[in-house]
C-alpha cells in the first residue's frame, strides 16, 4: 500500500540555510495494516504525510501509494486515499450532511450516490443525530469525527490520519479511536496515523514506526519494541542487606534477567518478560528462605523505548525543539 525509497524533503529557510525535514524514508506498509508514526515535534511526520498524500513534492526519492507514484500520478493517488491533516476542519456554516454531500460530489459521486454514502458515514461515525447541525457548532470530538467521515467519502482503502485526536478531551479521544478501530476492523482500511499520545499508539497500532530528526529509527510491534529496547523491571524489597545479597545471587542464577542491581534492601532485575519471571523469582526466594516484603513489576511505555533509542524522552525532545524554534525566531 505504501512503499517509499530514500524519500527526502528539505526546506530552504533563512540565509540559504536549509532544514532536512525527512532524510531518506524507506517504509513498506501493506494492505490492512494499522501503523503509528511516532516522534517528537519536528521529527518529520507531517512532512512525510504531506509527501505521501501528494500535497508536497519530495526533494528526492520515490513513493508508491495505493499502487501509484505520488509524483507521476498524483491524481490517481488522491482518488485512492483519505487524508485527515492537522489543520482540517469542515466549513463552519455548513450543515454536517451538506459537508458530506459536497465532498462526495467533489470526488465525482452522483447526487444519489453522494446521498447514500453520506447516510452510511453519518451512521457509522454516530453523526446521525447531528446531521442538520452546523459544523461550527459541533464539539471538538464530533468535529473530528466529521473530518474523518469527510476523508472517507470516496471509500479510500488507505487513510492517513495526522494527529486525529490532538486537543480532544479523554472521552472524545476514546470515542474517535473507537470509530477508527472499527473502520479498520470492518472494512480492512489500511491506516497510517501520527500521534503524540504514546498510549494511543500502544493500544491501537499493530506496528509503530519511530521517527527522529527525519529518520525512522525503529519499526516493530509495540510489544517487541518494549521488550527488546526497554525491557521490564522487577523490584523486590527484603528485610536486610544480607537477604538482598542472597536474593541478587538467586536472581543471577535465573536465566532471564539481563541485569541485577542491589540498593540496600532493594533488588532490581531487568528482563524482557517480567510477568513470567516474577512468580518464578518469588518461588525461588521462598525455597531459599528469603522473605520478600514487597514485589513490584514495572512495564515500559513507548516513551521508555524512545529513551532507549535516543537517550532522551519524547517530552524532552519536544522541549528542545520548542527552544530551537524560539531561538530561531529571536535571531530572525
Ligand atoms: N514549510 C516549511 N518551511 C520550513 N521548514 C519546515 C516547513 N515545514 C516543516 N518544516 C520543518 O521540518 C521539520 C519537520 O517538520 P514536521 O512538521 O514534518 O514535523 P512533525 O513531526 O510533523 O512535527 P509535529 O509533531 O509538531 O507536527 C521541522 O524542523 C519543521 O520546522
Image (spheres, grey):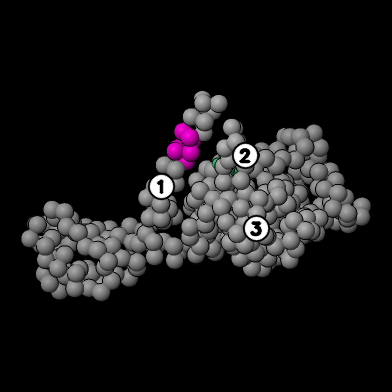
Q: Position of residue 269 (x, y in %)?
A: 25, 62
Q: Which residue is mark 3?
A: 61
85 with respect to 249 (left or right): right
Which numbered disc, 3 or 2, marks the residue that appears first in the sequence?
A: 2
Q: What span is colored magenta in the figure? A: 318-324
Left or right of 140, for residue 68: right
Magenta portion: prevailing SS class: helix
**What is the secondary structure assignment of the residue under circle 2?**
strand
Residue at position x 72%, y 63% in the image: 66
Task: In this rendered view, identify the residue nearer to me: 159 or 125.
Answer: 159
Residue at screen point 52% across, 31% down: 328
Mark 2 vs mark 1, foreground winner is 2
Q: Residues within 10 Å of mark 3 (few under 14, many from 20)?
A: some
Instruction: Determine which residue is flagged by label 1.
Output: 313
| Sequence-earlier tag: 2 or 1 | 2
Q: Is residue 100 magenta?
A: no
> Does the beta carbon at disc 2 come under 8 Å from ligand 1?
yes
Residue at point 54%, 63% (across, down):
207
Between disc 1 and disc 3, the foreground one is: 3
Would residue 290 appear left or right of 166 to someone viewing this image? left
Q: What number is the disc on residue 12?
A: 2
State the SS at label 1.
loop
Q: Is residue 235 above or below residue 318?
A: below
Position above or below: 229 against 17: below
Quadrant where the C terminus lies? top right
Q: Position of residue 112 (x, y in %)?
A: 91, 55
Q: Is residue 206 above or below residue 319?
A: below
Q: Is residue 56 above or below residue 61?
A: above
Say whether residue 130 is visible: yes
Q: CA distance from mark 3 to mark 2?
A: 18 Å
The x and y percentages for residue 95 are 81, 39
Amino acid at each position: 500500500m505504501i512503499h517509499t525509497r530514500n524519500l527526502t524533503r528539505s526546506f530552504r529557510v533563512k540565509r540559504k540555510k536549509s532544514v532536512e525535514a525527512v532524510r531518506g524514508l524507506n517504509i513498506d506498509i501493506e494492505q490492512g495494516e494499522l501503523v503509528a508514526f511516532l516522534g517528537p515535534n519536528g521529527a518529520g511526520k507531517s512532512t512525510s504525510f504531506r509527501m505521501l498524500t501528494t500535497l508536497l513534492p519530495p526533494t528526492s526519492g520515490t513513493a508508491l501509494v495505493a499502487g501509484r507514484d505520488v509524483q507521476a500520478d498524483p491524481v490517481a493517488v488522491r482518488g485512492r486515499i483519505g487524508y485527515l491533516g492537522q489543520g482540517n476542519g469542515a466549513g463552519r456554516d455548513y450543515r454536517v450532511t451538506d459537508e458530506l454531500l459536497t465532498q462526495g460530489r467533489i470526488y465525482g459521486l452522483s447526487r444519489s450516490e453522494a446521498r447514500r454514502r453520506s447516510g452510511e458515514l453519518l451512521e457509522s461515525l454516530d453523526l446521525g443525530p447531528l446531521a442538520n447541525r452546523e459544523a461550527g457548532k459541533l464539539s471538538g470530538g464530533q468535529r473530528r469525527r466529521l473530518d474523518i467521515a469527510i476523508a472517507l467519502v470516496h471509500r479510500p482503502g488507505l487513510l492517513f490520519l495526522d494527529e486525529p485526536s490532538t486537543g480532544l478531551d479523554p472521552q472524545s479521544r476514546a470515542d474517535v479511536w473507537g470509530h477508527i478501530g472499527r473502520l479498520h476492523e470492518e472494512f480492512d482500511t489500511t491506516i497510517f496515523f501520527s500521534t503524540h499520545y504514546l498510549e494511543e499508539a500502544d493500544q491501537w497500532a499493530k506496528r509503530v514506526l519511530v521517527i527522529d530528526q527525519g529518520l525512522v529509527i525503529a519499526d516493530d510491534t509495540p510489544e517487541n519494541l518494549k521488550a527488546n529496547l526497554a525491557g521490564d523491571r522487577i523490584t523486590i524489597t527484603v528485610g536486610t542487606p544480607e537477604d538482598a545479597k542472597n536474593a541478587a545471587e538467586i536472581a543471577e542464577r535465573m536465566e532471564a534477567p539481563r541485569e541485577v542491581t542491589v540498593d540496600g534492601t532493594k533488588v532490581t532485575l531487568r528482563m524482557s518478560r517480567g510477568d513470567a519471571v516474577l512468580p518464578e523469582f518469588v518461588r525461588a526466594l521462598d525455597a531459599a528462605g528469603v522473605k520478600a516484603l514487597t514485589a513490584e513489576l514495572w512495564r515500559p511505555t513507548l516513551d521508555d523505548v524512545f529513551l532507549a533509542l535516543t537517550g532522551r524522552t519524547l517530552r524532552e525532545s519536544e522541549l528542545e525543539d520548542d527552544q530551537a524554534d524560539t531561538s530561531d525566531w529571536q535571531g530572525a
